[in-house]
Image (cartoon, helix red, strand yellow):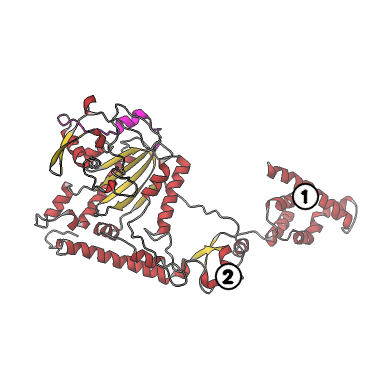
Amino acid sequence: MEREGVFNYITKGKRLFQQFAVDNFVKVESNKLSFLELHQNQIRKDRADILNVTNKNNIGQRVVLPPTFVGGPRYMKQRQQDALAYVSYYGSPDYFITFTMNPNWSELRKGMNKTGSTETKSCDRPDLVSRIFKLKVDSLIEDLTHKHIFGRVKEYLYSIEWQKRGLPHVHVLLWMEERVTADIVSQLISAEIPDKEKEPRLYHVVTKCMIHGPCKGYDESHLCCQGKHSRAQKCGKGFPKTCRNDLLFGNNGYPEYKRRSVGEGGNSLEIKIKGEKKTIDNSWVVPYNAYLCLKYNAHINVECSNSIKCIAYVTKYVNKGCDRILFTKTSDNGDVNEVENDQEARFVNPNEATWKIFKFEIHKNYPPVTTLDLHLEGENEVFYNDNTSYVIRRSSHKAVKALGLLADEETWKNTILEIINHTNDRKQLRETYASMLVFSDFEDQSGIWEETKDLFASDYLHIKNLTECNDEIYLDTLDDIQKHVWNCGEGKHH
């Protein structure tokens, strides 16, 4: 923390401060992982049908990370499922926004100048980068959800990530109350170079932050021309885009935005690439919103996601998690140790370290999603430890019943007796019993009948002037119950 009149030597260490931040985050994270590894008996679980075997030494994963561990595989899986829950309920998101930290922000420069060194870079102050970007993200969400600069938002989610060089960025998905039309998109999203004379500030931001590359045909050493999604001598991001005079909602996930060519009234600029001057037109502009660009002076890519094809990509990309190396470690018997894998395959940069030390959120969504676990019979997940006897494990139904969460025969018998105490109407009693037979899960139906059959048939004794029930009276009683069962069954079917 910076305090007036106090010289904080830690934040003046530059690369040593970066190492200090990463080391201390690793200590915090390692402490959490050690706790999880030592308390596996409280978090290990697997499917009940898999556990019901005799050889318990080869059951399940021996060391696992629970979904409460932020950044772990189950945590990220749940975040992805939350996003898909929104999609299944509300449909495709309307806007996909990517907001990247600008290392030249005035707030960051002002904070770094306090060190008294003109050579300080943004990477030397990961604490300032995290704090300032957190404030910017909060401000962006405020603009979108409360100031309604795109219209009223009914739900949103965002995820924080870090680039290889360390700068943080946030992916935001928005679902709007009002249906997004071509006219709305044309007003909110632009993909053209502004007029330098009429809009000098916007021109400066767009030309500095919203121009892709250029790569193909200019400088093909860019990562977008080398990744797995790119082909030989082709940009993986699809640049340069096709110039056109109007907006077209396409079928590839994103619209084809208005990008006028220079001959049709579009603007251009000259840049130097490897010492040579090159002319760049609108085909290289990343789609943006003018208001957000002017306010935040940063790379803010705004896309309208109007096609069902982009849903899987967007929800998975937004929740893909932190960077990791391709690494898997297994023990001799094939068990996976997820704690060791997380420690040894993890890539951590100083900005991510300080962000998580400050306990800033890396995911946020509204409204909240509540998990409803559904499973087939015997496939429910149960907690277990090495001392559990799997062979005598109760079935799901018996376990719930043992916990008192399921009504048993004794409960139904007490219910019948309670009805008798409040009414002498035996016909109503038989109707209630018929309903129990149809809508309840009795394991021993005959047991209840044998214990209470005289109560069901007592009115027949008066009708026939008898003092004891006989088989004929019991048959009449069962016939009456059977009629009520048929009536209840028809209602249940409908």
Q: What residue type is labelled 2?
A: Tyr
| Residue 48 placement (x, y as % from top left) | 57, 63
Q: Which residue lies furthest to the top in this view?
A: 264
Give me the residue at 51% from left, 71% from top.
Answer: 385
Q: Nearer the viewer, residue 144 or 196?
A: 196
Q: What stretch is highlighted in magenta?
A: 175-197
The residue indicated by pointer 2 is: 390
| Residue 478 placement (x, y as % from top left) | 82, 52
Q: What residue type is labelled 1?
A: Asp
Q: Does the magenta stretch include residue 340?
A: no
The residue indicated by pointer 1 is: 425
Query: With 412 as the anchor, is 307 left or right in this view?
Result: left
Residue 427 visible in this rendered orientation of the protein: yes
Query: With 437 as the anchor, is 97 left or right in this view?
Result: left
Q: Which of 235 and 435 is in front in this view?
A: 235
Mark drawn on residue 196: none
Q: Pick the quarter of the image with the C terminus.
A: top right
